[in-house]
Amino acid sequence: MSVSRRHDPFPVKDPYHGIYAHGVETRAGARMLHVSGQVGESPEGVLAPDFAGQCRQALLNLESVLRAASMSFRDIVKMTFFLVRREDLDTLVAVRKEMLDGIRPAVTTLFISGLVSPAWLVEIEATACAE
């Protein structure tokens, strides 16, 4: 049995592009991992020049943290995306579909005035649960 269950009740509007769930229920006793915001900088300190590259790298960094806890993208129950430019939303959706196909956590996406480094275009945090 999975440690979490998705809830998308009627009459709540269908999730945007089907890429998240309105609610995710986690079973008691599951291991829970809270992942700090990950940005588009590689372990070698290279920052992708474009949003898509930064978004992919932030997700790869997130995947590394999950793997260190013996978890994967499938264990994510909540994600928060912080974007500094509204025009990057469609690219975020495309990269999510590319890298997180079928992964439907509860999601919040925020447009903010800036991140710690002015060169960062996205920051992604997550909560994951597993056996």
Image (tube, helix red, strand yellow):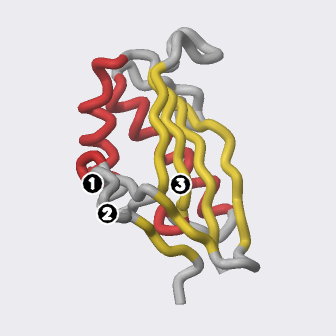
Q: Is residue 82 above or below residue 69?
A: above
Residue at image location 55% in from the left, 74% down from the top: 4
Neighbor class of circle 3 (other Cα within 10 Å; few <14, some 14-19, many 20+) is some
Q: Amino acid at mark 2?
A: Phe
Residue at image location 34% in from the left, 19% down from the top: 86
Q: Is residue 65 above or below residue 48?
A: below
The residue mark sitting in front, 3 or 2, is: 2
The residue mark sitting in front, 3 or 1, is: 1
Badge 3 marks a residue whose secondary structure is: helix
On the question of residue 40 being in view, the answer is no
On the question of residue 44 being in view, the answer is yes
Picture disc at residue 14: 1
Query: Split into 4 quadrants, where in the image is the C terminus?
Result: bottom right
Q: Which residue is mark 2?
A: 10
**Label 2 close to label 1 by CB (< 8 Å):** no
Distance between the alpha carbons at the discs numbered 2 and 1: 8 Å
Distance between the alpha carbons at the discs numbered 3 and 2: 32 Å
Neighbor class of circle 2 (other Cα within 10 Å; few <14, some 14-19, many 20+) is few
